[in-house]
Image: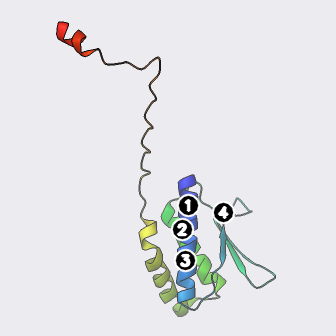
Amino acid sequence: MEGNTLRFAHTAKALGRAAHRLGLGAPSFRSPPKDHAVARAVRRNGDGTTTVSVALRDRPWAAVVADMIEGVVVANHLDGAAAAPVRDALWTAVAALVVDQPETPRPRPARPAGPRARAAPPADHAAAA
């Protein structure tokens, strides 16, 4: 889960930067939505900001990113012809983050030498055998 949380944070930052480059507002992102029955929720806050909540658990990563992109579109009140180029630009901004990559196994730390560690036989012992 930690991997998806970090990917979510990196994707949110990338989408925020891309939205600003396009002259749009960047919503806040959080996970999971308060209503666990939905995959995405958009909440307009009293201070004029927007929060997009997206479920991560048991979903393909591309679906999560699609919901995040759609959240930016909804937060900026875009639809129809105005929304299409924005979606394209946002997808381009996060394309490298969307590729589902298998988790790379972490290398195991070396075991410290201890009473159970097998020592190499002394050099003269090996020659005698």
> Which one is in front in this view, the residue at disc 2 or the one at disc 3?
2
Relative to 37, residue 21 above or below: below
> Which one is in front in this view, the residue at disc 4 or the one at disc 3?
3
Q: Is the C-beta separation of discs 2 and 1 under 8 Å?
A: yes
Element at label 4:
loop
Numbered circle sitting on residue 31: 4
Say which residue appears at 50% left-offset and 59% top-offset: 60
Residue 129 in sight: no
Relative to 12, residue 75 above or below: below
How far apart are the two marked residues, 4 and 3, measured between alpha carbons? 15 Å
Give amino acid for label 2.
Answer: His
Say which residue appears at 44% left-offset and 38% top-offset: 108
Which residue carries the number 1 mark?
6
Label 1 or label 3, whichever comes before in sequence order? 1
Q: Residues within 10 Å of mark 3 (few under 14, many from 20)?
A: many
Q: Is the C-beta separation of discs 1 and 4 under 8 Å?
A: no
| Snapshot quadrant of residue 9 | bottom right
Element at label 3:
helix
Q: Position of residue 112 (x, y in %)?
A: 46, 29
Relative to 112, residue 55 above or below: below
